[in-house]
Image (cartoon, helix red, strand yellow):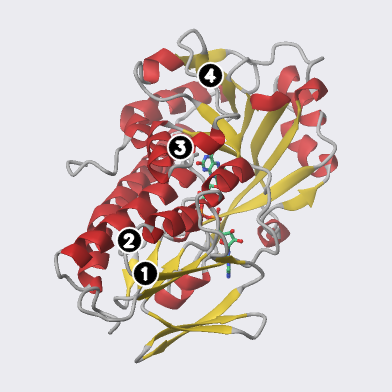
Amino acid sequence: MPDSLTGSVRPLRIAIVGAGPGGLAAAIALGRLPNVDLHVFDQARVLREIGAGIGINENTWRLLKWYGADKNLDAYYKKRDESVIDIQMRDGLTGELLGQRWQKDSSPVGPPYARVERYKLQNALKKEVPEGLIQLSKRLVEIEEKDTGLTLKFEDGTSFEDADLVVGADGIRSVVRKFAFPDHKLSFSGKVAYRVLIPQEDVAHIPDIPPSACFWHTPTTHVYTNPLDEGKFEIATRALETDENAGKVSWGQEATPEQVVHHYKDYHPTIRAIVEAPKSWLSFALFGGPRLETVTAKGRVVLIGDAAHPLSGAFGAGAAFALEDAYTLMATLGYARTHSKPQSWALEQFDEIRSPHYEKLYHILNTYEQVNKEVFAIEPPLDPSELVKLRLQKNAAGASTAWIYKYDVRMPSN
Ligand SMILES: Cc1cc2nc3c(=O)[nH]c(=O)nc-3n(C[C@H](O)[C@H](O)[C@H](O)COP(=O)(O)OP(=O)(O)OC[C@H]3O[C@@H](n4cnc5c(N)ncnc54)[C@H](O)[C@@H]3O)c2cc1C
């Protein structure tokens, strides 16, 4: 009985595809529901680092507590310290400080701040997933719909039959999304993110490195620098790569310094010295896609995390969105179960909560795009520093983002 959460004798058979932050969170959350038969599949041979730092904002932190994973991050987060600058904005060409926020400005009573390596977040969640639940080396290639449920087919020739619910947590290039929404297409944004974590001692000789996270902006690109815990230093850049081959770069592929450094030759000397420090980088060709009108399909499929919103990491909060999705899915399925509602009802509720959230995020990106067009269209053209300043001002005036990081998905009023 695929559409019934109640009165069914056999447990609800759930397949979660993907064991990134979204899939792991779903495994913990759905595992707390009674009478579920839960399976998690990931294509990776081992769950490992992909070279990115992840921001643990207020919303992420709150949910990590709920998932029981906050304690596993204790060694890594930075205690909230009101005397500490949270983030700076600088002109990438001149180094001029354009704005900054202190930790006390964003939430005086909030949780600790953190930015951690992605695998640490993943490990913190994984510790809370019951042993033996995750099957690795299971690359989903196809889903087949049958009367008895959905069949997942894996690259190794094995399959998983009769799923009542498939949770697509398989990231931006989601195979589950392709099955549910075959017409939805991703496209290369023309930008590549180069990212790396290096020892802080590799940049210790460089003068004027901000002590906090810092975005260094130019009209077309930016560089993000951040001294992390445990003596690591994070660099995350955006570069324009207009040639056709750039879009073929796979996710997390190694890149040489030569591929990266030339993009930043006009930047302020501090940034030039910083981007010259790493001996190798990881490149991430940034793909995005239009907003999905709905994130559930066929009464049996639900997308969570990056699979649900191909936003290309635009808000630095993708892990938080994934945790929010997984929580919401648990809550709607749980409610349906205790109130004799069918599974399709639970998925509709999930969609009603999460799709508008993603709509708001896409609206912000549309605003930014519009502002960008406007500032580039000004005649006579602005000099680069004026353009950067005006765009930051207009972005701030046109679209607020602070709410994203405070959002509490557990509150009915949200
Ligand atoms: C440039 C960039 C910067 C970012 N910066 C931040 C940041 O600062 N803070 C933040 O919170 N977020 C950030 N994000 C986003 C964040 O990395 C993701 O949003 C977050 O990891 C989403 O988790 P997820 O579980 O949905 O997807 P993913 O982390 O992508 O995990 C998907 C999982 O599915 C598996 N998988 C994929 N395909 C298959 C398949 N066919 N079969 C089986 N398994 C499969 C993968 O192996 C992977 O384990 C950034 C993203 C980008 C691109």
Considering every residue shown, the one lying at the far top of the view is 83
Tell me the kind of residue under disc 4: Gln
* Sequence-wise first label, 4 or 2: 2
Q: Is residue 365 above or below residue 163?
A: above
* Secondary structure found at label 2: loop
Question: Which residue is disc 3 drawn over?
Answer: 372
Q: In which quarter of the image is residue 162?
A: bottom left
* Secondary structure found at label 1: strand
* Sequence-wise first label, 3 or 4: 4
What is the number of the mark on residue 33? 2
Residue at (55, 22) in percent of width and height:
78
Residue at (27, 84) in percent of width and height:
1
Q: In which quarter of the image is residue 296?
A: bottom left
In this view, the residue in front, 250 or 132, is 132
Question: Which residue is disc 1 drawn over?
Answer: 36
In this view, the residue in front, 120 or 189, is 120
